[in-house]
Image (cartoon, grey):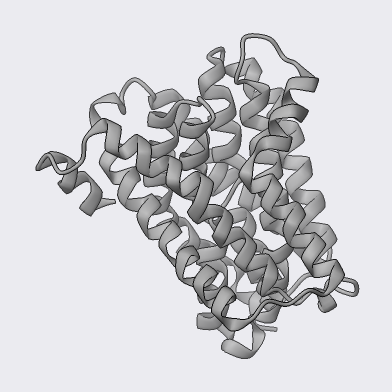
Amino acid sequence: MALGYFLKRVKLFTPLLLKQMNAVCFYVFFPALLFTNLYNSDFTGVINNKVIPFAVVGVLTVFTLLFFLVPVIEKDNRKRGVMIQGLYRSNHILIGIPLINSLFGGVQTSVISILISVIVPVFNILAVVSLEAFRGKKFSFMAILKNCARNPLIITVIIGFIIILTGLRFPPVITGTLSNIAGIATTLALIILGGTLEFSSLAENAVQLVAVITGRLVVIPFVAIFTAIQFGFRGPELAALLAVFGSATTVSSYTMAVQMDGDGQLAGQIVALTSVLSMITLFFAIVLMTPYLFV
């Protein structure tokens, strides 16, 4: 993000170039990343893993509550979808595996890998719904369905699951190429995000930022982890749930917001600030959760 901001300041980035690069991320790099995650996932552990339904139900519950609550406190449609996405959608892909590997060692990362393979499609489908729902002046269920059907991430999820169910496998030359393309996605998106940040508008979005940051990094993880402990989750499973419900807002939420006519400036600020502040909140969360993580 700092590099992107610097490149904008030295005039190597223009608004048109950033817009075009963002479109490439949305239509090419993020679909490649999503497909690669699905293709390389092992779903054999999903059936008997209780953490999966808990996480899915938790995400759907949070999303449903936000879908009705956020419009009550925010009147701007372009901000509504962005706030909903910023509150429920976490960066658990980047945080989850390193977190569990650091706490428990590499042998325990299978839990978060399975969780990622299930939650990523759920996150993306809900993101499209939240942004499409508040894209126009009037709510249109048919318009949402129509635009969801055209969304490259939704199409990628459908294709990915068809390939998984049919057992189709590709030669290494194809999977290797897709992996290389996917590897560009997050880095480029962060650079683009940095190039679009405008700190002068922080004051303008102060209320929205405080609400989203507090909900994303404090309220939602506290409620989710407290509930998970009551359900008996411990160790790597509990850490995996912390990654889903307690990490920063994912960078792809900014890319989607811009492409789907949301408030890109607010979306970028949410990603930037939650990314920085989550380093503090995750640290204290792990400290407080220690008796339940190492049992």
Q: Is residue 224 visible?
A: no
Snapshot quadrant of residue 88:
top right
Which of 26/105 is in front? 26
Residue at x 50%, y 81% (from the top left corner) = 102
Q: Is residue 174 visible?
A: yes
Residue 133: image location, x then y, percent: 68, 23
Residue 230: image location, x then y, percent: 81, 61
Q: From what the image shows, is residue 290 above or below residue 254?
A: below
Q: From what the image shows, is residue 74 above or below residue 166?
A: above
Residue furthest top as drawn? 137
Snapshot quadrant of residue 15:
top left
Residue at x 70%, y 65% (from the top left corner) = 117
Residue furthest left as drawn? 10
Snapshot quadrant of residue 291:
bottom right
Q: From what the image shows, is residue 24 above or below residue 120?
A: above
Which of 272/168 is in front? 168
Q: From what the image shows, is residue 52 above or below residue 157?
A: below
Residue at x 50%, y 72% (from the top left corner) = 177
